[in-house]
Image (cartoon, rainbow, N blue to C red):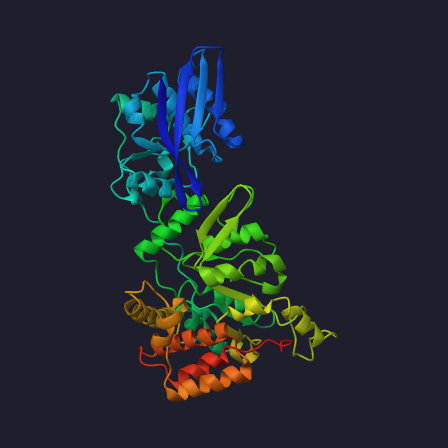
Amino acid sequence: MTTHAPTIAFAGIDCLDIDVQVQIANGLPAFTIVGLPDKAVGESRERVRAAFNSLGLSLPPKRITVNLAPADLLKEGSHFDLPIALGLLAAMGVLPADEVAGYVSLGELGLDGSLAPVAGVLPAAIAANAAGKGLICPGSQGSEAAWAGDVEVLAPTGLLALINHFKGTQVLPRPQPMLADDESAPLDLRDIKGQESAKRALEVAAAGGHNLLMIGPPGSGKSMLAARLPGLLPPLEPAEALEVSMIHSIGGHLAEGKLLRRRPFRDPHHSASVPSLVGGGSRAKPGEVSLAHNGVLFLDELPEFQRAALEALRQPLESGRVSVARANAHVVYPSRIQLVAAMNPCRCGYLGDAGLACTKAPKCGAEYQNKISGPLFDRIDLHVEVPAVSPADLSLPPPAEGSAQVAARVAAARALQAERGAELGIRSNALLDGEELEKLAAPDAPGRALLAEATDRMRLSARGYHRVLRVARTLADLQGGGGVSRLHVAEALSYRRLMPGRS
C-alpha cells in the first residue's frame, strides 16, 4: 500500500505541488528517500526516526521507501520532515490515509517531536486554498497561514498534538491572523536643520515613488534624510501587504507569522554580494531588492558597492522583477522598489572645499563618481546635492514643519495617482509608461518647449526624458493634481544634474 502526503516546493514565490509517497514493503530493513532530495531532505530520515522514538513509536523492520514526486525536481529545505512523517504514520495505520491526503503539510521536526518554523508558510497556505486542501504547519506560524482565506489550518506545536487531533482526543483551535506590531514612532524631519532643497526632493520622491540620489560631504545629513523617508510613505494596501509578506515568508523573515503593514526599508551594507542584493545562491532565495518590494532600498556609500552588484540592479529597476537563472533553477521574484542612494562627492568627501579637500581634487571626484555607470545613473529620477550644514543652521530652532505635515501632502498626491491609475493598476507616477505617460503627464505648450530645449542641451536619453515627465507629473500632483506646467518641468529638470566627470 502506498500513502500520499501532499506538500510543496518553491520556485520564486510560486509553489509547486509535491506528492510525498510512502511505501512499507517486505524486505531487508531500510529507510530510503528518493526523488532528488538535497542534504537537508536526506537528513529528514534521522529526524523522523528520532521524533517517532520520542513518542514511543518505532518504525517497522521492513523496507521503507519515500518518493518525492515529481522525481526530476530538486527538493530543498527541512520543511519536508512533516509530510514524510505523516505519510509514514498513514502507512503504519496510525493515521487515516485519506485525511492525511487532504492536507498540504510542511514543517521541520525536532528530535523530541516538536515542530520548528520553516520558510514559505504563507504562499503554501494560498496554494493549498487554491487546490481545495487544508494546511498543516508549525504552531508558531498558524497566524501566517490564517491570512490565506477560508483554508482549514492545523497549527500544532508538535507531532503528538497533531496525532491526537486526528484521533479526536484533542482539538486544535483555528489560528487567528495577526498583524506585525507597530514599531517605534518614525523619525521626524524636524530633527534635520537646514537642507531645505534636500527635504523638498525627499518629499517629491515619496509622493511619486521616484528613485533618489543624494550627493554631499560627510555629516551633511544624507543618511538622516533617508532614514526619515519611511515616515512619509503611506501604509501598504492589503494586496501589497500580502505580496510583500509572501516574499518575506519565502526568505524566512516573517517574524512570528505576522503580516507586514509598513513598507519595507532595507539598507544593506556596501560589502553586500551580488546574490545578497538580487537573490540567488546555491539555494535560491530572495535578495534585498526583492525584500524591499513595494518599499525602499537604501544604498549608503553607493560607489563603495561592488560594481557587479550595482550593475545587477539595472534590470530590476527597469522591469520591477528579478530573474535568477542558475543551472539547476530559474526563478523570478518581484522587485518593484524605490531606490534611495547616498554618496560622497569624492573619496575624501570634501570635493569643492579648498580647506578640506585632498591634493588630488578635482580629479579624484571624477574618478570616484565614475564608479557609477551611466545606465544606472540614468535610472535615478532625482539627483540632489546635500551641502554641509552651516553653523548658522545648527543654531536655529527645530523647523515648524515635520514629517506629519509632509506625509499629509504625500498621501494626498498618492491618492490622486491611485484614483487616476485605478483602471490601469498603477499606484504611483514612477510606474507610468508608454501612452499613459504621454497622456497623463503631457505638459502645456511652454513646458513642452522648455523640455525640448533642455533635452537637446542636457543631452537627455529617452529614459531621462520620460523620467523628467514622471517627476513633473508628481510636482503637479503635490499642487493639487492640475496640468503639468512649465514651472513643474523646470523643477523636474533641476533634478537631472550631470555628475562631474561625465560628458
Relative height, residue 436 to residue 24 (above, below): below
Q: Position of residue 44 (x, y in %)?
A: 48, 26
**Residue appearing at x 43%, y 88% in the figure:** 449
Whether residue 254 is visible, yes or no, is: no
- Of all residues, the one furthest to the right in this rendering is 359
Most foreground residue, 9 or 285: 9
**Residue appearing at x 37%, y 79% in the figure:** 442
**Residue appearing at x 49%, y 74% in the figure:** 462
Q: Quadrant of the N terminus?
A: top left
Where residue 51 sits, quadrant-wise, is top left
State how many labels appear: 0
**Residue appearing at x 30%, y 71% in the figure:** 416
Most foreground residue, 459 or 344: 459
Q: Quadrant of the C terminus?
A: bottom right
Whether residue 300 is visible, yes or no, is: yes
Most foreground residue, 292 or 372: 372
Q: Position of residue 58 (x, y in %)?
A: 42, 14
Q: Position of residue 470 (x, y in %)?
A: 41, 74
Q: Position of residue 40 (x, y in %)?
A: 51, 31
Relative height, residue 128 to residue 184 (above, below): above
Relative height, residue 309 to residue 404 (above, below): above
Tell me if 483 is positioned left or right of 396 in this view: left
Relative height, residue 63 to residue 390 (above, below): above
Where residue 174 sits, quadrant-wise, is top left
